[in-house]
Amino acid sequence: MSKVKIKVDGKEIFAEDWMTIMQALEANDIEIPHFCYHPALKVVATCRLCVVKIEGVPKLQTACSTKVSDGMVIWTDTDEVRRARADALEFLLINHPLDCPQCEKAGECKLQDYTFKYGKPESRFKEKKSDFGKWDISSKIMLRPNRCVLCTRCVRYIERVLKSGGLCVVERGGKAHITVYPEGGFEGDYTLNVTTLCPVGALISKDWAFKARPVYLKVASSICTLCSRGCSVFLDVKGIEPVRVRPRKNLKVNFYWLCDYGYLSFKEFQLSRRELYALERKNSGLIRAMPEKVIDGILEFIKKNPGEIGICLSPFLTNEELIAIKEFGEKMGISSFYFIPPEYVKEHENSWLLKPEKAPNMNGLKRIIPAIKNLLDAEERILIVLGWIMNDVSVPSRVEKVLLVSNRIPENLKERVELFIPEAGWAEKEGSWTNFDGMVQWLSSAVDPAGESIRILDLIIFISRNLGLNLPFSSIDGIIPLLKTYFPDADVEGEKRNAIRKIGVR
Amino acid sequence: MNEGPFSQLLKVDGINKIERYLEQGGYSALKKALGMKPDEIIEEVKTSGIRGRGGAGFPAVVKWSFIPKDKRPVYLVCNADEGEPGTFKDRYIIEKIPHLLLEGIAISSYAVGANFALIYIRWEYVREAEILKNAIREAKEKGMLGKNIMGSGFDLEVVVHRGAGAYICGEETALLESAEGKRGNPRVKPPFPANVGLYGAPTVVNNVETLASVPLIIEKGGKWYASIGKPKSTGFKLFAVSGHVKKPGLYEKPMGYPLLKLINEDCGGIREERKLKAVIPGGTSTPPLTAEEADVSLDYESIQEKGSMLGSGAIIVMDDSTCMVYVAKKLADFYSHESCGQCTPCREGMPWLKEILARIENGLGESDDIPLLMDICTGILGRTLCPLGDAGALPILAYVKKFREEFEAHIKEKGCPFKGKK
């Protein structure tokens, strides 16, 4: 491998000698419009949009399929190139239904963006548009072949990445279109990736359809909550409601992909599935109370019964929350820490991305508090349970009273919960998780906590201050430097501080 | 039909049988070749100057010399997917003298180091595929194919693979995809088949007529072959003449033979003593020559000077009753149907051309349709992954340019002026 020097639009750049022009330009943040090219898929050079002019070569060449060579002189914006792009876009649009106002992809559609940027303003097409119908190809995906630009990313993903089948191109020429295998639907654990691969609105997640205009979404760079892989994702929030999860490129964890469960995992964090108000026990029932009053109640419990309290932690807590809780426990003289065992799905033991352990930070939890015990071994009378809960929680009958700070109250705990404070949701807090592989990754927040919910970190700092405990930090920024105590690679001074927020460190 | 070596063999009755072929001195070139070194054979064919007879006119032996010496196995593929409208030369060779083709395949395989050869034959050639299979069986029985051919130690298996009916599979990389059992879409080049071909192995792909010419070159010598025709277009060529001539058919001529002489003398002139209007010199994907341009000799360079191509040598003659809008529409019909559909300009452009041309022919044309047609053609030309885009757009653009007044008349008179005259 060696470096080569090429000239792009009069500017000299360096590239590796094995790169294609597309790769070299991408590495230098120079945009070349394209549909069929995708870094993870075989190059087919069929959309003909990424054409560039290479000096000394008579015809325009596709950037995706042409290798760079030393001294190559490339022009990406000549009249000839502009005309070829505009022609290709015109060709793609002649049979396109132009139904952008009712298309789920509008706003994040490559065809729309490129047409505005590189296309022609008017259509010269007077003929009848072709019509291939529309239908659902699986329980999760709907196909709108008329919008398709036949980039075949979906087909190549299934063939090359999944090494399976399901979608294919049938017919030739203008009749060519994407369809599903006649034997049946396209089902599996990794099918929804075709909806994010699709540059236009041809393959749409049924769950996402008609939910929101992408331009109105707030986007959090986050981590999937679903299993101990911890795939990098974008979490899209409409107003304060999470509405969509998309994979975020991370070549160290999930590449460009996400499992179907991950795509739909935001549902657990939607407002309808959460408790949003603080509650306290009055007589035999839980009723709403001022959050300040409930926090005071927790303080009272801690002051009155110092020796009888255990702390139970959810494997969904962030490293920063865990460090804060640990410091708090030490200062309070509480040494009994328990964890809620995550669900274990045996079928996912040998899956591609899916991990059997259904929680994102079991690894971090065990590293920060090595002496932590299973919740089943809890001996204390009073238990403070912290962090998100996905299923029912088995708490031993010895435990009489539960002080709960979580996203919901499990049915089987209802009788024992004394005080409840709702916890901030997925899109509402930031911090890091450590995946099964020891990768420390960052999730950022998009919105403030909904309803009366509160971030656990803020709660711990608040309680500590009230109890007169002197914690060595007063915010998340004070905790980040402590990460390296538990994760030697997460030495987040200087440059790595950005790395952890982007792709994670190991 | 006259003069050339194919014609002489074609005259012999029953030469499709190996006994008869052997009587005529068949397989003697193979015997001679097996006594030579592969490089000597390549040198001999190089001397002959023979250019690929499939249509592109690429020097045949250049493909052979691109085969890397250190990568094995090597495959030889005979392209018998003769789909270009107007072309029927390979069919004659396969049907009448299949053993000449097999002999050529054997010599060429030996030269490039292939022990496996595949004949990819178009789906429509049902009988021809059977003839080839029979011929292969006969040749194996006589020890001309199979293990240890004529005691030389050289093995060769020849297999007939039938296509599934797509014109695009005549393009060599689409052919390879199809032969591998995939959808017949052309591949991105490079890598070229000589490096990554059939099942990823180095592969030589040659046309039937090219391979069938090899025994002659070995027998009579490359120098002799090069002495026929023109300096850069050597040897004999089969011309498939169809259209408005009195005697259509297959004609074998040395390269450089005058086109008008072929039409007026050999083919007996235009039917019903009409006037020549246009002639397609090399199959429908080559631009037509007008009557004035038709005074040209049949070789690669001369026809290129006139802005067209010799192509596969399929000559289609059109008299003055022919509607050029209709011809262009038929072409657009064909190329839009045969576009594989993977790359944008060809997939979308061809059907668009077809729709516009159909409108003009049916009297629904508008004045801005003519510049639009030319614009669409330029949008396709040179912008597609494989040559099919050019093969459709280049001739259609030529029809519009050369016969523009006919297109204008269709639009002005709201219909075809030739209606009832055809």
Image (spheres, coloured by chain):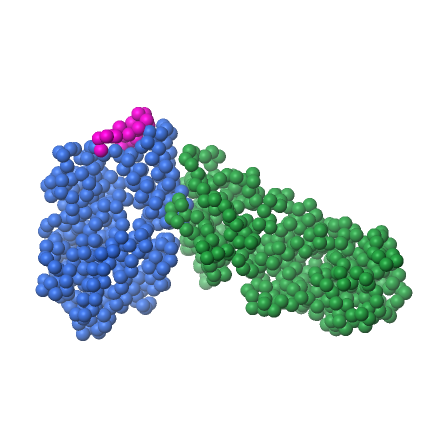
Chain colours: A green, B blue
Please tell me whether residue B402 belongs to the stretch shown in magenta. yes
Please tell me whether residue B42 belongs to the stretch shown in magenta. no
Q: How many marks?
A: 0
Percent position of residue A101, x then y:
56, 38
Question: Left or right: where does residue B416 sit relative to residue B346?
Answer: left
Would residue B184 be visible to someone looking at this image? yes
The N terminus of chain A - image quarter: bottom left
Tell me the magenta residue range.
B401-422
To which quarter of the image does residue B259 belong?
top left
The C terminus of chain A - image quarter: bottom right
Residue at the limit of the structure toward the right, as seen here: A304
Q: Is B407 rendered above or below residue B131?
A: above
- Residue that appears at 64% across and 46% down: A217
**Along the line of sight, which residue is nearer the eye, A58 or A200?**
A200
- Residue that appears at 18% across and 59% down: B98
Percent position of residue A200, x then y:
51, 46
**Along the line of sight, which residue is nearer the eye, B160 or A133?**
A133
To which quarter of the image does residue A393 belong?
bottom right
Residue at the limit of the structure toward the top, as seen here: B413
**Along the line of sight, which residue is nearer the eye, B291 or A300?**
A300
Percent position of residue B113, x then y:
26, 67
Question: Left or right: where does residue A351 sit relative to residue B221?
Answer: right
**Along the line of sight, which residue is nearer the eye, A4 or B85?**
B85
Would residue B343 be visible to someone looking at this image? no
To which quarter of the image does residue B392 belong?
top left
- Residue that appears at 82% across and 68% down: A399
Percent position of residue B95, x then y:
18, 56
Q: Is A202 rendered above or below residue B320?
A: below
- Residue that appears at 58% across and 57% down: A260
